[in-house]
Amino acid sequence: MVGNQPVIPGFHPDPSVCRVGDDYYLACSSFEYFPGIPLFHSRDLLHWTQIGNALDRPGQLRLPPDTLSSGGLYAPTLRHHDGRFWLIVTNVSTDGNLIVTATDPAGPWSDPVLLPDVHGIDPDLAWDDDGTCWCTVAGVRQYRIDPTTGETLGPARAVWSGSPGAQAPEAPHLHRVGDHWYLLIAEGGTERGHSVAIARGPAPDGPFEPCPDNPVLTHRGTHHPIQNTGHADLVQAPDGTWWMVFLGVRPGGGTPGWHVLGRETFLAPVTWADGWPVVGEPVSGPHPTDGQRDDFDDAALAPQWISPRERPAAHCTTGERPGWLTLHARGTSLDAPDAVFTGRRQQHLTCRARTLIDPAQGRGGLAVRLDEQHHYAVEAGPGEVRVRARVGSLDPVVATHPVPPGPLVLRVDITPTKPLDSRTGPDTLTLGVEEPDGTFTELASLDGRYLSTEVAGGFTGRVLGMYAAEGTVHFDWFAYEPLE
Ligand code: 6LW
């Protein structure tokens, strides 16, 4: 069904997809968050379930405290070859390009093999019939490599620079279809000018001839509710049909339009004409009904929980107070790179998050995080709840409210705004507390534009979660529900 719903909503950009038999697997970027590179499984390309994260232990992923927000792990490529899954990705903050492999994509994944001589982001892997492995990077340049050792087997060669005048030829993916090798790229930058172009050649190293109808996908300059479409990958279904996964955003509000969920993964059908792909209208993902409630009864945290720069287990435990998640502050707030925060992506335009916090031994709360400089939070300490709104260098405490001692429920409601004029923001975030009798006391209602990519910059999206700012804070449960 044609529609505007992503197949993987929320901050899940740069999708790379492959199929093994009847099963599809897909990987996305994760930037400064640990664990890195979420992996999804599907049987129909529409319904995706997260099965793990490719880089989920410190030996695989180094994100030191000076890792910038929107640094870390950029776009991966996921392929199946010779009985194994191969994932290549760039850690722009530390290790550069690296490869991990697994027989089961749910893990465990191997320790990384580094590729110190492969320079460039968005690495792709493709194998020729004779076993030659090609690694193609943004630019677009190509290396012959030994993927088991990470060695390059010759210098980089420029293979295509994309359409004349277009900025940022990137996100290459090489696919063989029939007698041709197709080189799919993104160009125009990952903002409103984003697009997908393709070229083809007789061999994986070209020479490549551009498609006369490039771009094969772009929504630039249109009223389409999905914008910034680009960074795509291709996959063939068992019935022979072809599909494209790509990233896009859903801007809201007046002008220039603010997108708040980051770049999401969408799906569109592909047909072929004269040996070139023709991309159809996006197919709607399932209507979102799934929420998430976590009672923290299990020792291990679900794979959706992420923390900036360090694995959640480094500062969150369910062992200390059984049935609760305990967070130990490191003496800094959400504004610092070493913030103690664990959260999950906001995946719906309209949603609610609630958590039951016990702040008797410290101060912490419920936050909507875009980065260190852009977050809203409702924070509880002994006897008081306050709302903080950090926007750039401004950090007003927006509201304070006395509360009785003991655990209490913090809540944020997120609702899209109906544009009243050209300046209306994309959504409203209402933060407050639920009183012991269940009634909601609203403490602040804030414009969501300040937690958008258009304001904050970068490549990520909102993450909703719990944090500790001082001492030790316990959370009995966290509930996230879409209200659409
Ligand atoms: C990614 C590049 C891009 O490496 O943005 O949209 C960069 N595409 O291909 C970060 O996601």
Image: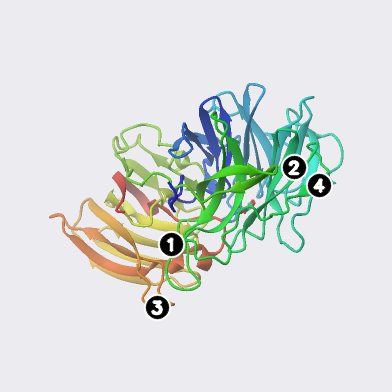
Whichever of labels 3 and 2 marks the residue nearer the N terminus, that label is 2
Residue that numbered label 2 is attached to: 136
Q: Which mark is residue 159?
A: 4
Whichever of labels 1 and 3 marks the residue nearer the N terminus, that label is 1
Q: Nearer the viewer, residue 304 or 241?
A: 241
Residue lying at 40% horizontally and 57% vertically, measured from the top left? 368
Q: Please state the horizontal and vertical placement of residue 308, each as a whole percent of the image.
A: 51, 49
Q: Secondary structure at mark 2?
A: strand
Q: Crowding near pointer 1: few (<14 within 10 Å), some, many (20+)?
A: many
Q: Please state the horizontal and vertical placement of residue 251, each as a whole percent of the image.
A: 47, 63
Q: Secondary structure at mark 1?
A: strand
Q: Crowding near pointer 4: few (<14 within 10 Å), some, many (20+)?
A: some
Mark 1 → mark 3, Cα distance in angstroms: 25 Å
- Tell me whether the residue at label 2 lies in contact with that at label 4, contact meaning CB atoms closer than 8 angstroms: yes
Q: Nearer the viewer, residue 306 or 217?
A: 217
- Label 2 or label 4, whichever lies nearer to me, is 4
> In the image, is residue 225 above or below residue 346?
below
Q: Which mark is residue 315?
A: none
Q: Please state the horizontal and vertical placement of residue 263, each as a whole percent of the image.
A: 52, 54
- The amino acid pointed to by label 4 is Val
Mark 3 → mark 2, Cα distance in angstroms: 46 Å
Whichever of labels 2 and 1 marks the residue nearer the N terminus, that label is 2
Whichever of labels 4 and 1 marks the residue nearer the N terminus, that label is 4
- Tell me whether the residue at label 3 lies in contact with that at label 4, contact meaning CB atoms closer than 8 angstroms: no
Q: Crowding near pointer 2: few (<14 within 10 Å), some, many (20+)?
A: many
Residue that numbered label 3 is attached to: 421
